[in-house]
Image: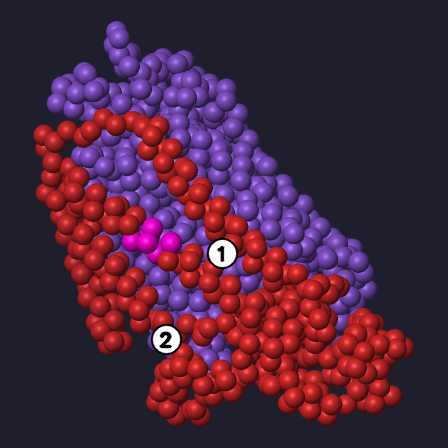
Chain colours: A red, B purple
Amino acid sequence: MLALFYIFIAVAIGVSFWQITRIMNLRSVIATDKDNATQGKNAIYFMVFLYAIMIYCLIFMNVIMLPESASFEGEHDDNLFDITFWLIGVVQFIMQFLIFFFTFKYKGEKGKKAKFYADSHKLEAIWTITPAVVLVVLIGYGLWQWNNIMDLSDAENPVVIEVYSQQFRWDARYAGEDNTLGLGNVNYIKGINTLGVDMTDKNSQDDKQVTELYLPKGRKVHFKFRSQDVLHSAYMPHFRAQMNCVPGMVTEFGFTPKYTTEEMRGQSEVIEKTAGINKIRKAKGEDPYVFDYVLLCNKICGASHYNMQMKITVVEPAEYDKWIAEQPTLASVIK
Amino acid sequence: MSEHHHKETFVTKYIFSQDHKMISKQFLVTGMFMGIIGVFMSMLFRMQIAWPEKSFSIIEAFLGPHQTDGVMNPDMYLALVTIHGTIMVFFVLTAGLSGTFSNLLIPLQIGARDMASGFLNMLSYWLFFISSVIMVISLFVEAGPASAGWTVYPPLSALPQAIPGSGAGMTLWLVSMAIFIASSLIGSLNYIVTIFNLRTKGMKMTRLPLTMWAFFITAIIGVVSFPVLLSAALLLVFDRSFGTSFYLSDIFISGEVLHYQGGSPVLYEHLFWFLGHPEVYIVLLPALGITSEIISTHSRKPIFGYRAMIGSIMAIAFLSTIVWGHHMFVSGMNPFLGSVFTFTTLLIAIPSAVKAFNYITTLWKGNLQLNPAMLFSIGLVSTFVTGGLTGLVLGDSALDINIHDTYFVVAHFHLVMGVSAIFGMFAGVYHWFPKMYGRMMNKTLGYWHFWLSIICAYGVFWPMHFIGLAGLPRRYYTNTNFPMFDDLSDINVVITLFALVGGFGQIFFIANFFISIYRGKKATQNPWNSNTLEWTTPVEHIHGNWPGKIPEVHRWAYDYSKRVDPKDDDSDYLHGQDFVLQTTPLLDGEDPS
C-alpha cells in the first residue's frame, strides 16, 4: 500500500513537470467541446472514486469505531447518531450523484441550448419545507436526549466523584461516606494536599483521593470537574461523556455505567477491534493490548496534552464497595 | 471619482496604490504567500502525525531549535497547528478571499469608478500587510510562536508558564490580530458604503449579481462581529500584561498560586466564538457568491432562484450571529443555553439546503462550459454538501458531547469552510484572472490542478471523519500513548500522503498563475460571454474603470440563454446570442425575469 503511494507521488511529480513545460506552450485557455467531453467523463470517473472511498470507509472502518455505548444514557446518543448518520448518508449519496452526473450529462456542446429556467416557487417550497420537517424530528429527539443527559437532579444515591485536572495528569476524589465532597481551592494546595482540599471542612474528612477511577456498574455516577491551571477536557469516549474542566469553576456531568470492564472485553465489537490492534502491535514487537476504559484530555492544554490519561475500571457494585472501603480517607492521610 | 489624469510613479501605481484593481491584486498575492506558509505548515505536522518517531531532514532544516534530530518538539507541533489555523482562516480565507474579490469586483460589478474611499482601501491593505509581517515575525521568536490553538483560549494563552509560546509569540499574535481586525473593519465599511451609494443608474439592489450580495452581507457580518474579537483580544492583553482577571481565576501553576480572582475562561469563549462562528460565514459566503456567478455563467443558464439565494444568504448571516454557543456545548455553560444553540444551529441547514439545491438545479439542463473555474465551483458544491451534512451531527448538542474536539470536527470544518472556500477562491482566480491581468490562465494546468485538489481533499478529509468517530482527539502530538488508537495509524499515513500530494499539487496553480501573468494568452474583453458589468470595461486597466460614461443597467445579471419567447425552449435566443449584457435595454414587452 505504502509503496504504491510513493510511486504515485513520483509519477505525479514527473508528470507535472512534463505537463507544465508542454502545456504552457499550448496557450489553450477556454474549454472547447472536446474539453467539455473529457471533463464530463472525468466527473464520472471522480464520482466512482468518491463512491468507492465513501463505501470503503463506511464498511471497512466499522471495526475501528468505538463500541456500543458503555453507559445507559449513551444508548440514545447511539440511536440518534444512527438516525442522523443514515439520513445524511442517503442525502450525501443522492446529492453527489446529482452534482457529478449533471456535470457529465449537461456538458456543453456547440448548438446545444441551455434551458432558460430562472425559478420555481413550487420546487423552492419543497426544498425549504422538507429539510424543515426533518429537522423538527432531529431537533426534538436531540433536545430530549440533551436534557436527559444534562439533568443530574433526579439520580438516587449517585456516586459523587471529583475529577481533578492539572498539567499533565488526572486525579480523582471520591465523596466518601457522607457522599458530599469537601470544599476545595487552589489556595489550600500544599505538600501532600495536591488537590487543594479544605481540611477544615467537615465534609472533606471522609473524602478519598485516588489516581484511577473505579465505577460501580448500574449506579449513576455524578462527576464534578475542577482544574488548577488551564482548560482541560475530561473525555470518556466509551461512555459518550465529555466535559471541560475550567479553572475557577466546577463543571458537572453524569452517566450510569452499563457494562463492567470484563463484560466489555467480551463483546464481539471489542474483541474484533482488539484483535486488529494486537496484530499491529505484534508486528511492531509491542505488548498485546487489553481493552480498558479510559479518560483522556481533549482540550489543548500544553506540551504533554497528548499524554494525559486516566484508566477507568467498571466493576460489579459489590466489588466496588470492597474497593472503596480499602481506600484511605483524606483525614487519615493529611494530618 | 478620479477621472483626472495625474502622473503615476512606480510607488503610487504598484505600492501605495489607491486603485481598487491594484489593491485587489496586492491582497491576492499576499494571501497566496501566506497560504503557501499555512499549507506548508500543515504538511509538516501531518508528517509528524503519520510518522511520529521518524526523523526528517526537512523538519531539521525548517524547525531549527524546535526539533530534536529531525523530530519536531511537542510545543512546536502545537505552534504549527495554531499558526496554520490562524493563517488559513484569517490571512488567506478572510483577507485573501474577501480582500481580493470584494476589491476587484465591487466597483466593477456595480458600475463605480472606484471604492467610496480609495485611501481607506489602501490603508486596509497596508494594515493587512503589516499584520501579516508581524505574524510571520512571530514564527521566529525564541520560545516559538503562539501555540494555544487558533482559538487561543486562556489561561493557556495567558500564561507563559503553561506553554512557552504564550510569551512573546502570543504577544505578537495579539498585536497582529488587532491590526488585522482594524484592516478588516476598514475594508468592510468601505464595501458596505460603496455598494449602498455608488451603484450606477439602473443597478437596483435586486439587480445586483449574487457576488455583490454575498460580499455585501459578508461585510455586514464582519462589522458586527470583528469588534467583539478585538475586545476579547484587548481583555486578554489586559490579563496578560496589566494584572486584570477577566478570564483567569484560581490558578496554581509552577508551584505557586497566581493572584487572579473571579474571572472565567468561559467569558473568553463566548466573546471569541461570537466572532468565531460568523467568521465561518465571512469565509464561506464570498466563496458561495463567486460560485453562484460562475456556475450561472458557465452553465449558460440563469442562476436558479435568485431571490431565494439572496434570502438564504441573509438567513445564514442572521443565524450565524446567534449560534456561537455550539462550539461550547461541553464548556460548562448552562445546559439550557445548549438547547437554544442546538435549535438555532440546526436551522442553518434550511438555507444551506436551499443553496445547494439551487446550484444543482442551475446545472440541470445547462450547456456546461467545463472551464477550470466551473469545475472548482462544482467542486465547491460537492465539498459544501459533504461538509455541511456532518454539521447536522455536530450541531446536535447530545451528539456533540462525544465527538467534540475529535478529528470528526476537523474533517467537518475543513470540508465545509476550508476546502469549499479555497475552491471558491481558485474558481474566482481562474474566472477573473483576465480582468486582473489582461491575460488568460492555462486551462490544462487548471484541470490538473482541480482534479488533483479534489481527489486529495476527499482523500484527506473523508477518512478523517472515521478516526474522529473512533474517538481520536485533535491536537495530539502523537497517539502512540493510547493503544486503543493503534489501529488508526495506517489511516493517518494515507491521509498524510494525500495531504502531501495535494499540497505539492498546488504548484500547478502557482506556476500557472505566475507564468500566465507574463506569458498567458492575451484576454479578449469578455472571454466567458458573461453578462455582468466588469466585462464591459477595457482589457487594459485604466483609472476609473470605464473610459467614457459609466454604463447604465437595464436588467438583472442572469439573462443567459434567454429566448424570444421565454416559454418556448425551441425559439431563438434573444438578441441572437446566449447572453444579454446587463447594459442591454429591455425590449418592448420583454419579461424582466
Q: Position of residue B190 (x, y in %)?
A: 52, 29
Q: Tell me if I can see residue B194 in this picture.
A: yes
Q: Residue at x 30, y 43 (%)?
A: B377
Q: Residue at x 42, y 58 (%)?
A: A83
Q: Position of residue B209 (x, y in %)?
A: 37, 27
Q: Residue furthest top?
A: B588
> In this view of the protein, which residue sits in the foreground, B146 or B458?
B458
Task: Look at the magenta stretch and give its main secondary structure.
Answer: helix
Dots 2 and 1 on the same chain: no
State whether residue A284 is above or below residue A148.
below
Looking at the rendered structure, which numbered label has been put on residue A63? 2
Q: Position of residue B139 (x, y in %)?
A: 53, 61
- Identity, as a three-letter code, of the amino acid under mark 1: Leu
Q: Tell me if I can see residue A164 in this picture.
A: no
**Badge 2: chain ID:** A
Residue corresponding to mark 1: B394
Which residues make up the magenta segment? A87-93
Q: Secondary structure at mark 2?
A: helix
* Residue A221 figure quarter: bottom right
State whether residue B271 is above or below residue A176.
above
